[in-house]
Amino acid sequence: MSRIRWGIIGAGSIAARFAEALAALPDAETLAVGSRSQDSADRFAEAHGFSRPYAGYEELAADPDVDVVYVATPHPFHAENIELCLLAGKSVLCEKPFTVNAAEARRVVGISRRRGLFLMEGMWTRFFPLMDRLRRVVSDRTIGEPRMLAVDFGFRAALDPTSRLFDPKLGGGAMLDVGVYCVSFASMVLGRPVRGTGYARLGETGVDEQFAAVLEHGGGRLSTITSGTRTATPQEATVMGTDGSVRVHSPWWKPEAMTISKPGEEDRTIEAPPEGNGFVYEAAEVMRCLRTGKTESEVMPLDETISVLETMDGIRKTWGLRYPGEEDAR
């Protein structure tokens, strides 16, 4: 596959940033975009160099020349969009959160595995060069045995009940928007969580405007998470081990540098500035997997995506927070 031909479902800001990343990759072809209207698809195609704009998603999924589809629609539509593409024989990269809950994730993962098609969650943070360095620091026991972790991701947004951040029908709330980054990071560093608990502030629209959680990862390893859409946080991540610690500088979810601290030694800072807007790395991973015949990525395995959602489901259940239509996923 000399050039891999991409389609994008959705024509919003995230789709635009991903299209910019594809344009920077010489082996990626920006072929097709599907939007809810022809006008929107036409405008996106003209702005980002796509030759086939479609009014709707079905035509894009049926396009025989599309190799892989990036799903960039609002959270509650991810599962149905993934399923549409998989049933049409397309490989899929879906923006985080992969689905609203673990039941939806298990369903679409089952389809991809039965059909032998590539599928991956677009958790872009994992693919940055600095995250690869961090994984090596942890695996090489540079800071000893990792035992605890603290990570936060919060920002202050104006309350708008109709926006995707606050509307329950759009999967609003801190957990699905930014908390998923934190749970996934904790899972990557300390292993998949075995249980979790937390407390949340549910706002006037009924979604979590901020929350704090503690996860247990087995062997007594613990992570603490704070996240919010109405409260700004430092946006740092610290991994604590038996012989030292490593702090990923803010914003840790778009990482450029980290500092290793060990008793009796000078702090050591490692820098790994990303290229472009950062989406190039996950796109390159998808194309690497397609060329080598892989149906999932070792960096973001599907079973781990499911376990992260299971953890989030469990925490959310204690708050009594369910999204409209979520019962359909059971």
Image (cartoon, rainbow, N blue to C red):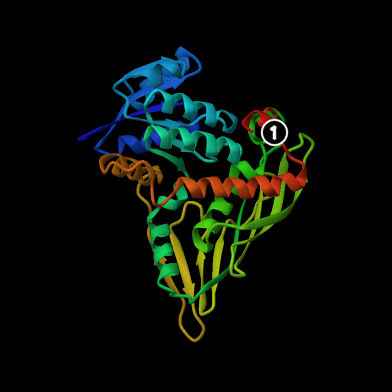
Residue lying furthest right? 204
Q: Where residue 28 appears, x then y in whole percent?
A: 28, 35
Name the residue beneath numbered marker 1: 323
Disc tally is 1
Q: Where residue 159 appears, x then y in whole percent?
A: 72, 36
Quadrant showing the C terminus: top right
- Where is 217 relative to 117, above or below? below
Which residue is pictured at 54% across the width and 39% down the height? Answer: 106
- Where is 197 relative to 69, above or below? below
Quadrant showing the N terminus: top left
Residue 298 appearing in the image: yes
| SS under mark 1 | loop
Q: Where residue 256 appears, x then y in whole percent?
A: 43, 57
The reply, left or right, for residue 81 in relation to residue 103 is left
- Which is more toward the observer, 79 or 259? 79
Q: Where residue 282 appears, x then y in whole percent?
A: 38, 44
Residue lying furthest bottom? 264
Residue lying furthest left? 2
Which residue is pictured at 23% across the width and 33% down the height? Answer: 3
**Looking at numbered disc 1 in the image, what kind of residue is underneath it?**
Tyr
Which residue is pictured at 61% across the width and 42% down the height? Answer: 176
The reply, left or right, for residue 167 in relation to residue 27 is right
